[in-house]
Image: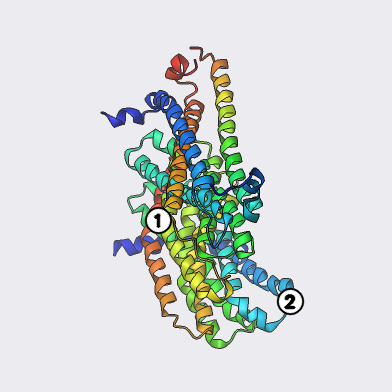
Amino acid sequence: MNWFKYASPASFYPLAGKLIPYFAAITVVLLAIGLWISFFVAPTDFQQGEGYRIIFVHVPASWMSMFIYCVMAFWSALGLIFNTRLSGMMTQALAPTGALFAFLSLVTGSLWGKPMWGTWWVWDARLTSQLILFFLYLGYLALTSAIDDSRRRDKAGAILSLVGVVNVPIIYFSVIWWNTLHQGASVSMTKAPTMAHTMLMGMLIMALAFWGYTIAMGLKRVRCIILEREMSSEWIKKNAVE
Amino acid sequence: MQWNSFSDFIHMGGYGLYVWGSFGICALAMIIEPLILQSRNQKIRRQVKRQGGQP
Amino acid sequence: MNLFTTVFIMVRRDLILALRHKSELLTALFFFVIVVNLLPLGVGPDPKLLSKIAPGVLWIGALLATLLGLPRLFAHDYQDGSLEQLSLSPHSFTLIVLGKIMAHWLVAGLPVVLITPFLGIQFNLSGPIIAVMMATLLLGTPVLSLIGSIGAALTLGVRGGGVLLSLLILPLYIPVLIFGAGAAEAYRSGLDMSGYFWLLAALDILALFFAPWVSAVALKVALE
């Protein structure tokens, strides 16, 4: 199979359209199973009671926000190396969903923190670095929406996301360092509940559901971007709008 | 099954606000985002049609 | 030696240009001084509290002062077309960019380091802590200029460039802020602070190798 064939927007557009329903279906099924496990199969935690059930959306959202940032960096590298137009579009299609998951992770983390630690926000290493990841997403979105020329937008965005992905481990390390230095000031944390087998299962299934959701949204958005950019090209006039 | 009644389920052992708040905001986000994309898609399709991009 | 002359010529050129606009030259410095001096007015004049928060305040002031000059780093040369000329010159564009970054540091970073003792006295800092602060600022501010140049290159000629630049760059400044302000904190608590200096030095080296190159690539994209 020739993968480069699908690197052109004209041939990727219909393929994406065909794939979206499958991923949407996978998402709905996995969400149903995941929610069922979250509320009916997973047992009550002996330390945190029912409050820990937030974990089933919080952890998958955090995972996805980090994972999407890496995928964006992957597309960016591909775009800079092979100079394919689709890569930049894919990066921009994924960014809003990634930012959304980073935001959801922060909100659910805060909703989890309030009953468990007695405060909406703790300057803990993980929360802080998640916040910074959210800022990095905002920076990417701000930059790409401020540049009008699409070629420059793709390349500048690609450079920024690669710079970001190189910096993320350094930032994470420095935040952990900072956290241990200021240990006295931070609230003592309750350990995450020990993982029961079903809980891990639930988290994994929810994470897969979010993954399917991300792909479906990414493809949907990339189709919009392709249409917006190539509005005047021949292939769209011929067959994109049915 | 750890819920004796529906109100028990809603109450979530005292954590109802937080648990349902978390799941609720995720559900809300995952409903709104597709809707936004759908309207963006329709807008651009109308524009393509107006440009004479008839099939 | 050719490599060094390219950088040197560029540094000299930019410094001469900067000296022509003396008001611009001092803006970053005054900004730093004023921001840092506003703080006691906000939190009160308690000397204990002030000396506790001084390292963080000085560092945040330094971050903002560096940011202030960044939009101008390439803007003048971009507008009058000389940046394009430079990008086409036979000399390595990366080194030219490095020269411009060094000039920016000499104008924006170095004065901040030199004024720190006076601000330190205002904040009731002891001599050794002032020395630690100056050392970390001396090591850290070049990283700020280097990383900042990437943001300046990416936002060159983009509408809303200045604000956008801060949004892109400030999150990337976090490690420098943490290690820089952390060293003074560690000194005060009697901990070993050599780790902070090594980490800052490592950031210096990393940024020195990658930032000019990435900025040069980003500038070429902007010039296309």
Mark identifier at residue A166: 1
Residue B49 placement: quadrant: top right
Q: In this picture, is B8 found above or below C11? A: above
Residue at the (56%, 62%) spot, across then down: C20
- Quarter holding the N terminus of chain C is bottom left
User: Nearest the camera: A46 or C74?
Assistant: A46
Q: Which residue has dot 2 on it? A: C44
Q: Chain of mark 1?
A: A
Q: Are marks 2 and 1 in contact (CB under 8 Å)?
A: no
Residue situated furthest top in the rendering:
B55
Q: Position of residue A146 (x, y in %)?
A: 56, 42
User: Nearest the camera: C79 or A229?
Assistant: A229
Q: In this picture, is A10 found above or below C47? A: above
Amino acid under disc 2:
Gly
Distance CA(mark 2)–CA(mark 1): 40 Å
Q: In this picture, is A111 found above or below C116? A: above
